[in-house]
Amino acid sequence: DNSRTPMQWDASPNAGFTTSTPWLKVNPNYIEINAEAEISNANSIYHYYRKLIQLRKKYDVIVYGKYELLLPEHQEIFAYTRTLGDEKLLVICNFYEGQPMFELPEHITYQSAELLISNYPEKLTHELESIQLRPYDASVFLLK
């Protein structure tokens, strides 16, 4: 049962899981990897997921929008739109370490694009028609 270890709450003894001896061994990485460290790091996965949840609550299109897969044959890029009324999201993901070029299909039109979330700290500053994706890049745009 090596995949199960006590929850790593903080950097205290036994990862803050218990004051006695846990019956399963605590992973030795608990000093660096623990809930307290994630909460205190503004760039952590914890905060990324909080932002995703906030976006889901703010934009009905994320939940109820019609899904359209854009590049079904592409080997590296997973891109799609979700549309609900006047709201349209464009989601572009590169699940590989390469840097493929994303070409926006001609039938997707927009006047402006707002980057809602990205897993890279710097924002893309060019048009969506042609984007050099970064390794493991994931971005969501609100199209207007």
Image (cartoon, helix red, strand yellow):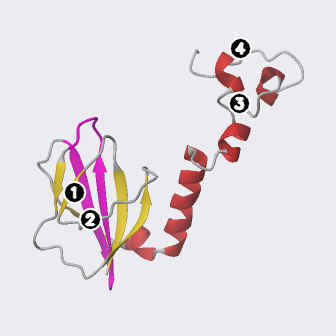
Which residue lies at the image location 30% right of the left edge and 51% below the top edge?
Answer: 93
Residue 85's x, y, as percent?
Answer: 33, 85
Instruction: In the rendered view, tell whether residue 91 sits above or below residue 121.
Output: below
Q: Is residue 33 magenta?
A: no
Q: Horizontal placement of 143 versus 74: left or right?
A: right
**Circles 1, 4 touching at the beta carbon (< 8 Å):** no
- C-alpha separation, residue under disc 1 versus residue under disc 3: 40 Å
Q: Amino acid at mark 1?
A: Ile
Circle 4 or circle 2, nearest the eye: 2
Instruction: In the rendered view, tell whether residue 69 sits above or below residue 99.
Output: below
The label on residue 7 is: 3
Which residue lies at the image location 24% right of the left edge and 56% below the top edge?
Answer: 79
For the image, the number of numbered tags is: 4
The part of the image, by quadrant, that contains residue 106 is bottom left
**Circles 1, 3 touching at the beta carbon (< 8 Å):** no
Work out whether mark 3 precedes mark 2 in sequence or the reverse, and give the earlier one: 3
**Image quadrant occupied by the N terminus:** top right
Residue carrying label 1: 131
Instruction: From the viewer's side, name the closer residue of 81 and 24.
Output: 81
